[in-house]
Image: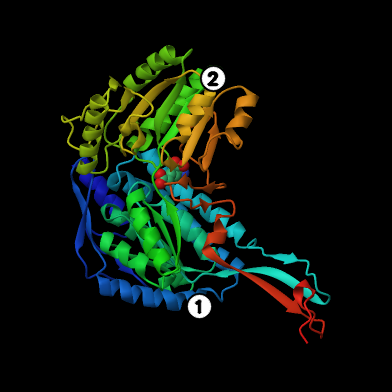
Amino acid sequence: TPLARTTSVTLKALGLDSYNLGVYDGAWSGNGDVAESINPATGEVLGAVQQASASDLDKTLQRAVKAARVWREVPAPKRGEIVRQMRNALFAKIEPLGKLVALEMGKILPEGIGEVQEYIDIADYAVGLSRMLNGSVIPSERPGHMMMEVWNPLGVVGVISAFNFPVAVYGWNSAISLVCGNSVVWKGAPSTGLTSVAVTKILAEVLETNGLPGAICSLAAGGADIGQAIAQDRRVNLVSFTGSTNVGRKVALATQERFGKSLLELGGNNAIIVHRDADIDLAVRSILFAAVGTAGQRCTTTRRLFLHEEIHDDFIARLIKAYGQIKVGNPLEAGVLCGPLHTRAAVGNFEQGIADVKAQGGKILHGGNVLRSLPGNFVEPTITSIAHDAPVVHREIFAPILHTIKFATIEQAVQWNNEVGQGLSSSLFTTSPEQMFRWVGPAGSDCGIVNINIPTNGAEIGGAFGGEKETGGGRESGGTAWQQYMRRQTCTINYSGSLPLAQGIKFE
Ligand code: UN1
């Protein structure tokens, strides 16, 4: 069939077979379980990855520790040069890699290519950053003394990423972590193992061509057991985890228990507020991408929509009309905007969510059904009308369900935006400068991402990405996020030949 051909051509272009080893630490191996990758749009088995056993992980961590000692001695701008080569190697494979993401994860092809582009963007950023890992010089209170702040590599960084961004989230972490001088050990989602292997092959070739240890970019494919072992292992100086709040809590406790560091990117429950003075057309188009894009499976997906009472009815009518035009189907087909959910289990969560909406006094305004006539895990993009405090509204359901809620005052809407446990992303649509500045101010949104007149999702890499509260508090990508991948040292140098003490203390 044409689809089977697409699969084999794509795998071949990326140097993959239908069966692949899922452990890389300079050499490829794998003695754990075999994980199959299933195309969520068709049920077709795309290929298989032999995952890491506990002793595979142990060996990989040993090699990653050794590799980190080599890598930290490479000057940072030279590390940037290696990341630049990785960026070019990724760019050369952007088409097949984007296609593999579409096949394996289930997002539409433009979004699959988009997330490889996101990796390329962060690699560009990291190359520049490699010349700007600046410390500072601090005036000392003592004569003949100098103080400075110096940033050094941490050692080994563990990256545990989720199925929904099988390329970009690893990209943010690895590109920054590499220029910071760390080796990286990656565990992707078991259901997107082919993508993990494909990305690692691209990076491994760059490392090996440059005569560097491949273990600088290690891969330990695996499930929860491998993730837990990474979180508990003292050799892993920082664990960067993207996933659910429940698993994130375990990672946080396991790393804290051993005084390791963690960087957490957990659940979101993001809202858009549309004020009465908003550009309605812009808002409708934004919500379409934010709530339906990636079939509602971004941590930044809009799940709650607060509409001012004056525009509410008209807005809902326009939104329902726009939803009616969305094409649901195979993510590789042109014109399709909504692909499948990633797993059968996710379809079950969708159904449970719809049942809960109905049981908790909500109404389904559009959609609400599983599309059983299609072969894959397809559901209808759904709009509900429900109370802001119904329990189901406070839960992150990783599916295209948008809850709409009417508000009377903007203060009320901001309070509702902030009342959930999660604190990732938020957007306000307004043309009022006063409302804009209130929204980004101390009494505005309590989220890590605070937008105006754009969707909650689709963040650029230049800013720090992450959220507050149950979202975990970590920041990745731009801004000062790089500092989490390094150790901060305050150094005081005495060139005076005498020993004046701080605070003027006399001790003789
Ligand atoms: C995620 O869903 O885990 O802002 C990350 C966005 C993307 C990243 C999402 N740049 O939607």
Q: CA distance from mark 2 to mark 1?
A: 55 Å
In this figure, which residue is indicated by the disc labeled 2? 279
Number of marks in the rendered image = 2
Q: Is mark 2 within 8 Å of ligand 1?
A: no
Amino acid type at image mark 2: Asp
Image coords of residue 208 (percent x, y) = 43, 72
Q: Nearer the viewer, residue 237 or 132?
A: 237
Q: Would you name the residue on which mark 1 appears?
A: 70
Which class describes the residues within 10 Å of circle 2: few (<14), some (14-19), or many (20+)? some
Quadrant where the N terminus is found in the figure: top left
Task: Say left or right for 148 vs 161.
Answer: right
Q: Vertically, is 146 above or below 4?
A: below
Label 1 residue SS: helix
Evaluate whether residue 127 shows in this view: yes
**Between residues 507 and 350, which one lies in front from this camera angle?**
507
Up the image or down, 339 lies above or below 207; here it is: above
